[in-house]
Image (tube, rainbow, N blue to C red):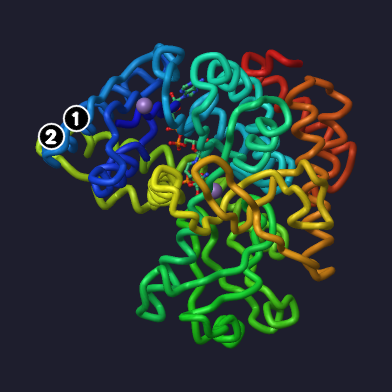
Amino acid sequence: GLKIAVIGGGSSYTPELLEGIINNQELLRVEELWLVDIEEGKQKLSIIEGLVKRMIQASGHSVKIIATFNRQEAIKGADYIITQFRVGQLKMRRYDEYIAIKHRVIGQETTGAGGFMKALRTIPVILDICNDIEQLAPEAWLLNFTNPAGIVTEAVLKHSDVKVIGLCNNPINYYKKFAAIYNVSMNDVSINFTGINHLLWLTELYIKGESRIKDVFHGCSDIYEAKNIPDFGWDLQFLRSLGAIPCGYHKYYYQSDQILQQQLEEFKRNETRADQVQKIERELFATYQNPNLIEKPKVLEQRGGAYYSEAAVHLMKSIELNTKEVHTLNVRNNGAISCLPINACIEVNCVVERHQVTPLQVGQVSPQIRGLLQHVKAYEELTVEAGVNGDKGVAHQALTSHPLIPSAEQAKTILKEMFFVNKEFLPQF
Ligand code: NAD
Ligand code: G6P
Ligand code: MN
Ligand code: MN
């Protein structure tokens, strides 16, 4: 049977992962599930442990659940390590958003200044985890969800020998949404993706092999939107000349003024996404403590990451059974997107085999896509370098390169404030 270690086990998303495991246990045959957290997450971990054990018991399957602070023991001999931790907890996410918005730039968990700061906090921790994996489970797959997933995965690809795959719930949610709209199975939906994590364009949509992307361009078909993304829609004329469907996170670039306006309002009311999530989380953990609860509750769908576990479980199943299927994953470019560096992390369709994951060739990217894609990837490349080497000059260049940061001066001011509140999380600087 499989040994799986979940780093950040106290996450409110864990019951969703359990649901996925339970539904696929006949094929997956998970023997041990280790939930790893740290002292700060003690209370959450113990509530999750209780719920997860009840879920397993109710399912009739026998999976051994071990909640622990001992990361090494959990990683040792594991087949899969799933990372879903948040360095500095939601408190630091709130700072990421607030410091940015205070300076009138977009404040977001993964995009812009907020995502940049989250990356700098996360990179030292993920590389430490990779060290453990290299020593204690060199054959294991690391499935990374920790955001900013593209940057964090790129740091691992460049600075460790660990077999890593970065995952996001966005791609699978497009399949789900289009399957529902066209009333077909997910297997009858094919999508061509180009881009990087949270900057993903859908360049083709096929339903049973027939191209249907024009349905979206003419408003006959809905697009998936995660719960954390503002829900104002797209200008269809704009989509037609773009020639692709942008992901929700593109709104931060294509509709920056409108988003910033909304964020300034939320800021005044103390209701940014971090505040909203803190509230949802309190509700979730209150629900989780109910001893009669034996399944994933509905409230979890209010979180942006809904169905992330389905992506993880499908992927593990594909690897285990060596089904050689296509999954949309964050992997090393290797030339699949020719206008990006060979060692960049990209998010595209990949063929998954038991021993390797290979990105499918994307081919030429239109200039509409290429400009923003190269711009943001250059920012990510610099962010990885800053996060690993702890060079403040590189950090300043990285943030200044981000398309949502208006000036070097502004970047410097934001950096200074962010570094001040993040001091304890930046051992590399
Ligand atoms: P959370 O705030 O609940 O954090 C999860 C757990 O991580 C907490 O219990 C915390 O104590 C623990 N943690 C913090 N530092 C740790 C460390 N060094 N080692 C082990 N555990 C540690 O966060 P969340 O909202 O559940 O999200 C978790 C992570 O997953 C975030 O990074 C988030 O951005 C990401 N996420 C990604 C996707 C995706 O699409 N890739 C989807 C959902 C969530
Ligand atoms: C999306 C993204 C995740 C992100 C989440 C945020 O689904 O794909 O990467 O972590 O939303 O959701 P939250 O509820 O934390 O704002
Ligand atoms: Mn084994
Ligand atoms: Mn994501």
Let me know if residue 188 appears in the view: yes
Looking at the picture, tell me which residue is in the foreground, 297 or 229.
Answer: 297
Looking at the picture, tell me which residue is in the foreground, 192 or 217.
Answer: 192
| Residue 68, x across and y down, in percent | 34, 16
For badge 1, the amino acid type reads Lys
For residue 298, side relative to residue 139 (left or right):
left
For residue 7, side relative to residue 344 (left or right):
left
| Residue 296, x across and y down, in percent | 25, 45
What secondary structure is marked by label 1? helix
In the picture, the quarter occupied by the N terminus is top left
What secondary structure is marked by label 2? helix
Query: Looking at the picture, does residue 107 appear above or below residue 146?
Result: below
For residue 57, the mark is 2
Residue shown at the point (59%, 42%) measured from the top left: 109
For residue 294, side relative to residue 311 (left or right):
left
Residue shown at the point (53%, 85%) measured from the top left: 210
Residue identifier under label 1: 53
Crowding near the residue tagged with mark 1, few <14, some 14–19, many ≥20 C-alpha atoms within 10 Å: some
Q: Are marks 1 and 2 in contact (CB under 8 Å)?
A: yes
Looking at the picture, tell me which residue is in the foreground, 291 or 276.
Answer: 291
For badge 2, the amino acid type reads Gln
For residue 119, side relative to residue 65 (left or right):
right
Residue shown at the point (76%, 16%) measured from the top left: 429
State the image quarter where residue 60 is shown.
Answer: top left
For residue 409, the mark is none
Let me know if residue 257 appears in the view: no
Query: Looking at the picture, does residue 427 appear above or below residue 286?
Result: above
| Residue 250, x across and y down, in percent | 66, 60
Query: Looking at the picture, does residue 117 appear above or below residue 192?
Result: above
